Structures are given as C-alpha cells and as structure tokens.
Amino acid sequence: MPEFDKILIAWYQQNKRNLPWRSNNDPYFVWVSEIILQQTRVDTGTDYFLRFIKTFPDAISLANAEENDVLKLWQGLGYYSRARNMHAAALQIINEYKGGFPSSYVDIRKLKGVGDYTAAAIASISFGLPYPVIDGNVFRVLSRIFGVETAIDTLKGKREFTELASLLIDKENPGQFNEALMEFGALQCTPKNPECPTCPFNDRCIALSKNEISNLPVKLKQTKVRKRYFNYLLVNDGNSFYIEKRVEKDIWHNLYQFPLIETSDTVNLEELISNERFVNLFDPKEIVIGSMGPEIVHLLTHQRLHVKFIDIKSLKVVPQINWIKVSLTGINNFPVPKIINDFLLEMHSNNNEE
Ligand code: SF4
C-alpha cells in the first residue's frame, strides 16, 4: 500500500489530540509520557504527567528524589514498578550518560524499565530514528487493514507485525508516523465499534471487506485472573494506626499498607480471629475487636482482590518489627495503594461529617 503513510499522516493532522507531551520532542518528556500511558488512559495520564514533570522537570531532579516521593506522586496509577524503574533509570542517565538522555536505540533500550516499545517511541519521536512502535493500537490497526491473522501474543506474530510496520514507516518522519498510527488506533479503529464509515482506509481495509473486524487482531491466550483475599487490620488506639511496608516481590512493592492477613478464601470475623497469623499477633486480653467492613472488590489486570478492613482497638499491642505507628493524617506522607487511599479518603470524609 504505497500511500499508506500519506493517508495516515493526513488523517493525523486533522484529528490528533492536543496533548501536553506533544508540545516538544524532549526525550525526557516522551519517556515520562510513554511510561505513564503504558497502562493508563490518556485523560488520567495527562494529570499525572503534568504533576510529574512539574515535580521532576528533568532526569537530574528525578534521580535526586527519594524513591518514596516518586512512589507517592505515582499513587493511584498502579503498576508501581514503572515508577521504581524510572527512578533507577534516571540514576543510570546521570551515572552512565552524564545527565544527557542516551540518543541511540540500543542505549535507550538499556535504561531500566524501557522495553522495545518505549525505546522505539523515544528513538523515533525525539531522535528521528526509523524504529516502529508496536503496541495494542498498532496490532489492531495493521491486523485489520492488512487482514493479518497471525496471533499477536506469539513470537511469530510480533516479528510479522514489526516487519510490516518497518516497511510502512515514513523514514523521513518516523516519530510522527508512529504517533499517528497509535492515535488512529485510539480514536478511529477502536477495539469496539470502530468508525469505519469515516475511515480513510475503508476502501481497502481487508477486515471490513471480509466482515472480520471483531475477529482481529487474533490472540491465543486468555488472561488468567487470580483471586486474592486481603484482610487489613486497622490496629489503632483511636488516634494512631500501624502501617507496614510491602517488601515482598509482589504487587505494590515498597508501598505502605495497614497490617495484612491474606487468606486463601473469604473469611468472616470469627474465622479471621482464629487464623494462625492473627493468633500470633495479638493477646486477646489486650485488644477489642471491632467490626469487619464489607468486602470491597478491587480489580487489577491479572488479579481480583477481595478486600476487607477490620477495626482493632488496642492500647497495648506489641508491634511487629516492621510496623510503623502513624497518625491518621500522617499516613498521607506515605505512598499507599489506591484501595488504601480510597479507604482513607472515605474515613476522613466520615470524620468531617461527625
Ligand atoms: S475500515 Fe474500520 S476496521 Fe478498517 S481500519 Fe478503518 S476503522 Fe479500522
């Protein structure tokens, strides 16, 4: 399709959204925006992007920050390893590249947390290098227009789509081409109900002509969702609470939470009290067990969390070595998962109403 890039760019110039990271091609800005947008919707990501670059306007300020402050700014975005990796990558930029952003694909790809997709985005947008970006939008658009039925979650599929995008890319302006292709997938050729009647490719789109739109792109594996049961203990004396840091290699690494007992299934209050971990934590004579809140379901991409909060009044708890005593407002200084932050916001608003 010889004029593919021209049609795409013409569409982009008419339809592209005015997004803050498009105001310049600074690799630091492109990097921050691409990492934020990996798992986040554009409207949510925009606020985070603006706050992030205001607090850390360059790699030096990010490298000099405490990891806790970076995680705090990231709070609510999820996939916290992205923030930890960015912090580590900023240190790499300072130590290995004297503070200047690396400018070759190979060097960009060596930064912590930067994969093929992000490296191609930065290399093409900031340095004009002809590396195609391959993300969910690109898979969808190319599979439909060209009728590619190879599964996108296979090595063969990734290779095939990368080769196709490399053939199509505008060598003069690869950054704009990549941005246009992703934007086209986000706005025109959407997963459900794509805008085919107004699409500039509707006279040649194979999926449209064969009525195969809903079958493309092809994916082999179904994402398995793991169910987990989190029981958070609000161990308090009325004013102060205990929190702990999540240090295991698991979701929310290095974030803070109320002391947690994870169970293999949902439990009621009686079952929780007889749980071995609970028995080891508390002397029943020294605590007053309050209510167990209703179960809240919190969805992550591969996990379904069933979360309960249990009020435990204790004047004389022997804290675990890793527990930190904080006031209710003091918790706000620590990065916490969204589910805890939502709970705290509700608690604050209930307190204000009383
Ligand atoms: S015609 Fe429809 S399915 Fe084909 S590229 Fe355009 S929007 Fe996507």
Image: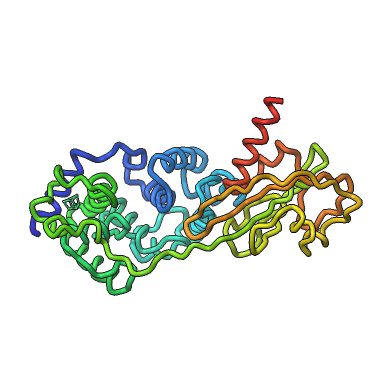
In terms of image quadrants, where is residue 270? bottom right
Residue located at (81% from left, 47% from top): 289
Considering the image in quadrants, where does the N terminus appear? bottom left
Camera-side residue of 259 and 34:
259
User: 207 or 240, which lies in front?
Assistant: 207
Q: Residue at x 16, y 57 (%)?
A: 211
In the rendered image, residue 342, in percent from the top left (x then y), is placed at: 59, 41
Q: Quadrant of residue 205?
A: bottom left
* Residue 140, x across and y down, in percent: 26, 57
- Residue 44: x %, y % from top left: 43, 41
Q: Nearer the viewer, residue 29 or 268?
A: 268
Residue 171 appears anywhere in the view: no
**Can residue 316 be seen from the camera position used here?**
yes
Q: Nearer the viewer, residue 235 or 72?
A: 235
Give percent across and percent down for residue 65. Answer: 58, 48
Asked if residue 276 lies left or right of residue 153, the reply is: right
Q: Is residue 117 above or below residue 287?
A: below
